[in-house]
Image: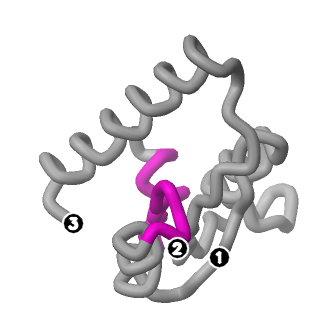
Amino acid sequence: MVPAIQNRILLSCGVFYAICHVITGVPKNLPITIVNQDTGVEIPVFNMNLSFSEAFLDSLDSEVMTKRYTNSYRDAYQSVHNGSSWAVLEFHKNFSADSLER
């Protein structure tokens, strides 16, 4: 997805969340669709694989968002288009490795 479009979608979600919070309180059970292709990063010293995407997803409030997983960005996009999801979170396969490099 083009970064400008991603930023617009994230901004729209942020504005929606702020409006809901001001008018009705904290939104509840907003369905989001997640495409997580992150393979994580190997930490040989600890003999483990670390996934920043999973850590982020685990930190999301399950009362505010209902997570739905799919392997296809097209299906995730379609779920927003047809109204069954409010947002798409997509993590590319090198998300954790790229996060470490920053």
Residue appearing at x 47%, y 56% in the figure: 87
Label 3, residues with CA under 10 Å away: few <14, some 14-19, many ≥20: few
Asked if residue 60 shows in the view, the reply is no
Judging by the rendered image, the residue that carries numbered circle 1 is 69
Q: Is there a contact, CB below 8 Å, between mark 2 and mark 1?
A: yes
User: Which of the marked residues, 2 or 3, is nearer the chain's N terminus?
Assistant: 3
Q: Position of residue 92 (x, y in %)?
A: 42, 69
Q: Nearer the viewer, residue 90 or 28?
A: 28
Residue appearing at x 53%, y 64% in the figure: 85
Residue appearing at x 75%, y 67% in the figure: 49
Q: Position of residue 66 (x, y in %)?
A: 73, 57
Q: Position of residue 28 (x, y in %)?
A: 74, 40
C-alpha span from label 2 to label 1: 6 Å
User: Which of the marked residues, 3 or 1, is nearer the chain's N terminus?
Assistant: 3
Residue appearing at x 65%, y 21% in the figure: 24
Please state if 83 lies on the left or on the right of 43 as rendered: left
Q: Secondary structure at mark 3?
A: loop
Q: Secondary structure at mark 2?
A: strand
User: Which of the marked residues, 2 or 1, is nearer the chain's N terminus?
Assistant: 2
Please state if 18 lies on the left or on the right of 49 as rendered: left
C-alpha span from label 2 to label 3: 13 Å
| Range covered by the magenta-colored residues | 83-100
Judging by the rendered image, the residue that carries numbered circle 2 is 35
Amino acid residing under circle 3 = Met
Q: Which quarter of the rendered picture does the N terminus lie within? A: bottom left
Q: Is there a contact, CB below 8 Å, between mark 2 and mark 3?
A: no
Which residue is situated farthest in the top direction here?
22
Judging by the rendered image, the residue that carries numbered circle 3 is 1
Label 1, residues with CA under 10 Å away: few <14, some 14-19, many ≥20: few
Q: Secondary structure at mark 1?
A: strand
Amino acid residing under circle 1 = Tyr
